Amino acid sequence: MKLKIIAVFIILISALTISSCFNVFSLLNPAEPAQVDSIPMLLSLGDGYISQGEYQKAYDAYARVLQLDDNNALALEGISTAYLYWKIPPTQFIRAVLSNNYSLINMNTLYDVSEFVQAKLYMIVSSAGDGVIPYNDININLNFFIFNTAFAAFLLGDTDLDRNIIMDTNDYLMFYPDFSISNNLPNTTNFVQAIKMLKTIGTLVPRFNTYIAHSEYSLGIIENSVYTPEAKATVSNVRASINMVLQTVVSNFESISNLTSLSQFGLTNTYGLTNLWFFEGFSPTNYTEFTNAMAQAGVSNLANMQPELMLLLPDLTNFNLVLSNYFGL
């Protein structure tokens, strides 16, 4: 069953539209950024390009600043704006909202933009920038919070890490063009597929949790910086909408948290694994094929799999013995 998460993306789109106010625009005669070494001139050049809607040129100007000064906060802010509107024209957001047609926003592009913007803005909110824009700037933290949270959700869904999240049948979450999500977990009675799933999620979940912790940090700054009832209500709505996305994403992995023992495979002991292997196509003479499949599942120590697998399924206590007996090692 697909779970709708449209509301949060309305807020996301609205915030992205607001983010066009990142910079105070100023017009200059165009110049080639690569030939300019003056940071103030490059910043003004980037601002001018943005005001003219020439976002790729603005990107090049801010990128040149970051070559000269990699923690320049104004350039980090500017390049975020430029990259966003270079990849996704502002008119697309407006059309999507007015027509209620969210397929106008390509999720793979939003995935890419979210990763880029959150990485640049994190430099500012984590105090790694030069301080010209303070770490607790509300606008920076709001945009970081939204893009960072969106990226975390996309990352957790992109379980094959191929940068494609639109109806990708190889992912454990299916993202649809209308921004709905459904569960696409593999058959957990297949031993090799289950191990691959557990290894993949075990790698992505810690990264996901780190990104979410960063989002919570920024949201805390925002909450402590607004005082009017209207502003507090807006922040509360943003938090509620983002939490809805997170709950939708995380709830789709609930069955994984229950996959902690052989009982999920209908087994009472390790020896029953040999029947699973046989029905999965690994006959006693196919040890090489089995180890290749386990390597593709993410197992790194093929000569001694038991310790690594017991971190996923603790009751695999005599796995190596069963493996040796079955394949005649």
Image (tube, helix red, strand yellow):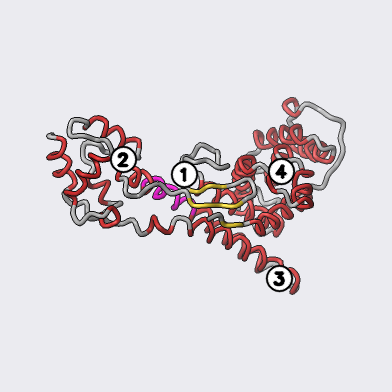
Would you say the residues marked 4 and 3 are in contact, meaning their CB atoms lie under 8 Å apart? no
Q: Disc 1 or disc 3, which is closer to the eye?
A: 1
Q: Is residue 247 magenta?
A: no
The span from disc 4 to disc 2 (Cα, nearest Å) is 40 Å
Image quadrant of residue 26?
A: top right
Q: Could you say where residue 269 lies in the image, as x and y percent from the top left?
A: 18, 54
Amino acid type assigned to the residue bearing label 1 in the image? Thr
Q: Which of marks 4 and 1 precedes in the sequence?
A: 4
Disc 4 crowd rating (10 Å Cα; few below 14, some 14-19, many 20+) is some
> Mark 4 or mark 2, which has the lower sequence index?
4
Q: Residue at the spot x=26%, y=57% of the render?
A: 263
Indicate the amino acid at tag 3: Ala
Secondary structure beneath label 3: helix
Tell me, for residue 233, which label it has, or none: 3
Q: Dominant secondary structure of the magenta stretch?
A: helix
Between discs 4 and 3, the one toward the N terminus: 4
Q: Report the magenta residues as a range.
A: 199-208
Identify the residue position indicated by label 2 in the image.
299
Query: Which of these two is toward me, 209 or 201?
Result: 201
Residue type at mark 2 is Val
Residue 159, label in figure: 1
The residue type indicated by label 4 comes to Leu
* Farthest-out residue, bottom: 229
Asked whether the beta carbons under mark 4 and mark 2 sit within 8 Å of each other, the answer is no
